Image (cartoon, rainbow, N blue to C red):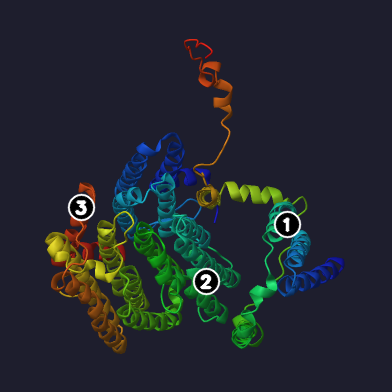
Amino acid sequence: MFPTILFFVFAAVLLCAALGVILARNPVHAVLLLVLCFFTSAVIWLLLDAEFLAIVLVLVYVGAVMVLFLFVVMMLDVNIEEMRKGLAGYWPLALAVAGFVVFAILNVIVVKHLGGLTITAAAPSPVGYSNTRVLGTALFTRYAYPAQLAAVILLVASVAAIVLTLRQRTGGKLQNIARQVAVRAKDRVRIVKMASEKRP
Amino acid sequence: MSFSAANFNAGLAYARPEIFLGIAACAILLLDLLLTDAQRHWIGVLAVLSLLITALLAAGQPVSGRIIALGGMFELDRMAQVLKVVSLLIVALVFIYSTDYLRRRAILKGEYYVLGLFATLGILVLISAANLITVYLGLELMSLCLYAMVAFDRESGKAAESAIKFFVLGSMASGTLLYGMSILYGVTGSLQLSEIAAALHNGLAANVGILFGIAFIIVGVGFKFGAVPFHMWIPDVYEGSPTCVTLFIGSAPKIGAFALAMRLLPEGLGFSQPDWSQMLVVLAVLSLAIGNVVAIAQSNLKRMLAYSTISHVGFILLGILSGTAQGYQAAMFYTITYVIVATGSFGMILLLSRQGFEADMLTDFKGLNVRSPWFAGLMAIHMFSLTGLPPFVGFWAKLGVLQAVLSVNDTWLAVVAVLFSVVGAFFYLRVVKLMYFDEPTDVAVIGGSVLMRTMLSTNALVVFALGMVPSALLVLCQRALP
C-alpha cells in the first residue's frame, strides 16, 4: 500500500514538473524543474527495484548534465520574449496537431484498450536481487556489442565537438613557454663591434 | 535467449569487417596528431586503404542463409554482405573524389576522413542489425558523424546553418523512431526483430498498438530516406554543405536508409505489411510528385540533385511497399545503382570546382563539351541514367520497380511513377542540352588529379556497363533477397 501511495505522489509531482518545464517563462526555472523531473523519476525507478539506474540518473543527469545546462542557459542570455514573438502566431496549427496526437493516443489506449492487450504486474523480485549485478551481467554479456557501439558514439561525439570548436587563431600573441625557457642571451642581445669615433 | 561466452566469441568472426573498420578509424584518428599539414593527404590514402581491406573482409565471408550472432544483436545474410561491400567501395570512391577538393579549399583535415569512417561503421552496423538497439545505435552513429561533417567547414555560415537544420530535424526524427520502437517493445515485449516478427505472426499483427508504433517508425524511416513530407532538410543540407560532404551524404547513407527500412519493415514487421504499405504509398507518390516537379525550378545543380534524390527515393519506396521478394530485389537494385550514379554526378561537380569557385550552378555546365568532350560524355551518361533512358542502368532499375508494382496490381502507382519520370526527364536532359548546345561561360582548364579523373571515368563506365549488362547485379540482388 505504502509504495502505491509513494508512486502516485511522485508521479503527480513528475507530471507537474514536466509541464512546468515547457510552460516556465524563465529558462533557468525550466532547467530547475527538469532537475525535479529527474529526481522524481529516480524515485519511481527505486520503487521498481532499479536502484542502480536511479542513482546513475541523479549522479549523471542531475549532477553533471543539468549543471552544464544551467551554465549554458545562464551564459547565453537568450531573450525569450524576443524569440517567442513570431511563435505565438502558430498556435492554431500547434493546437490542431497536439489535439490530433492526443486524440490518436487516447483512441489507442482508451477506446481500443491497446487491442485487448492485458498488462500484468511484474513479478516481485526475489530476495537478494541486485539490480546492479543484473545490469552489469547483461551489459558485459548479451549487450556487449551495443555497449561497444555506444562507446564509439561517445568517441564520435567528442571528436565532433572538438572539430567544431577548436580554433587555432593565426596571428594571436601567445606565449610559447618552451621557447622562452630555451632562449639564450645570444638570441636576444647582439654585440656589435664598432670603431670608436672622435668627438667632433 | 540464453547467452554463452563461447557462442559470443565464435560470433565475433562474423563481425570482422566492423571490428577492423572501428580499429582502423581509431588508429587514423591518433595518427592524424603526428602528421604535419604537408603529410596530411596520407590520412586519405590510409582511410581508402582501410575501407578497401574492410570490403575484402566483408566480401570474403562465407554466407549461407541467415547468421545471428553476438547475443542476437548481429545478423549476417546475403543482403547484408552485398550492401556492406557496395557501401564500403562507394565511400572509398567518395574519399578519393574529396581529397582534391579539400586540399584546394585548405580544409584538408584528418577529421573529415575519421568522421566519414565512423559514419561508414554506423552504416555497416545498421546493415547487420538484428535488434532494435543495434538498429538505433547504428543509425545514430551514422547521423552524428553526418551532422558534424556538414558543419565541418567552419568559415562557411551557410554550412553551419544547414548543419543546425539537419541536426534539429534529424534528432526529432530519431526521437520519433525511438518512440515507435518503444511502442513496439511495449506491445510485443521484445527488442529482437525475429521475436517481434514471431509475436506479430501469433496474432498481434492486428493490434492497434502495433499500427501506432508503425506510424512513428515510418516517420523515422521517411526522414532518413528524405521522402516527402519529411524531405525539408535535403535541399538545404545538400546546398549548404561543402560539396564533398554533399557527395558523402548523397551516397552511402542512402544504402543505410534502405537497410533500415528493410530490417524494420519486411523483417520485423512483415506480418503488418498491408498497414505500412498504405503509409508508404502516400510517401512514395508525394516524393515522386514533389521531387520531380520542384527540381524543374532549381538553378543550383546541388539543389536540383537533392530534389532528384527525393524523386528516386519515391521509386525505392515503391519497390519496398509492393511487399514481395521481387519488389525488395528491385528496390535493392535501384538503391545500389542510384548510389553509384549519384556519386558520379556529384563527383563531376567536385571536378569542375576550384579554389573560390563552386561549379554548382547549372550555368557552370554550359558548353562543357567544348571544354572537355570526354567529361561532358561522362556527365551525359549519368544524366541519361538518372532519367531512366534505355539502355542506361536507370532504365533497368525503374523497369524492375514498375514490374514489381504491376505484379501486385497497383497499376495506378506504376502510371503515376512513369508520368512523373517523364516530368523528371526535363531537368536531367536540360543539363545535357546546356553541355552540348550552349556556349561556355567558364573557360578555365579542368583540374583534378589523375587518380580522380581515372576514378570518375571508371565510375561512369561502370554505370554504362551496368546498363549494357545489368544481369550480374540483378542476379546478385535476387540471391541476396530470395
Callout in the foreground (2, 3): 3
Q: Secondary structure at mark 2?
A: helix
**Label for residue B141?**
none
Q: Which quadrant of the structure image shows residue A121?
A: bottom right
Q: CA distance from mark 2 to mark 3?
A: 53 Å
Residue A77 as seen in the image, left or right of residue B7: right
Residue B400, image x and y in percent? 24, 75
Quadrant for the C terminus of chain B in the image: bottom left
The type of residue carrying mark 2 is: Ala
The type of residue carrying mark 1 is: Ala
Instruction: Say which of B83 and B357 sits in front.
Output: B357
Residue A112, image x and y in percent? 62, 86
Q: Secondary structure at mark 3?
A: helix
Callout in the foreground (1, 2): 1
**Mark 3 surroundings within 10 Å by alpha-carbon count, few (fewer than 14), some (14 through 19), many (20 or more):** some
Residue B241 as seen in the image, left or right of residue A175: left
Callout in the foreground (1, 3): 3
Q: Chain of mark 3?
A: B
**Label for residue B453?**
3
Instruction: Say which of A91 and B271 sits in front.
Output: A91
Q: CA distance from mark 1 to mark 3?
A: 59 Å
Which residue is denoted by mark 2 in the rendering? B199
Q: Chain of mark 1?
A: A
The type of residue carrying mark 3 is: Arg
Q: How many marks?
A: 3
Q: Secondary structure at mark 1?
A: loop
Residue A72 as seen in the image, left or right of residue B441: right
Q: Which quadrant of the structure image shows residue B329?
A: bottom left
- Marks 2 and 3 close (CB-CB < 8 Å): no
**Label for residue A50?**
1
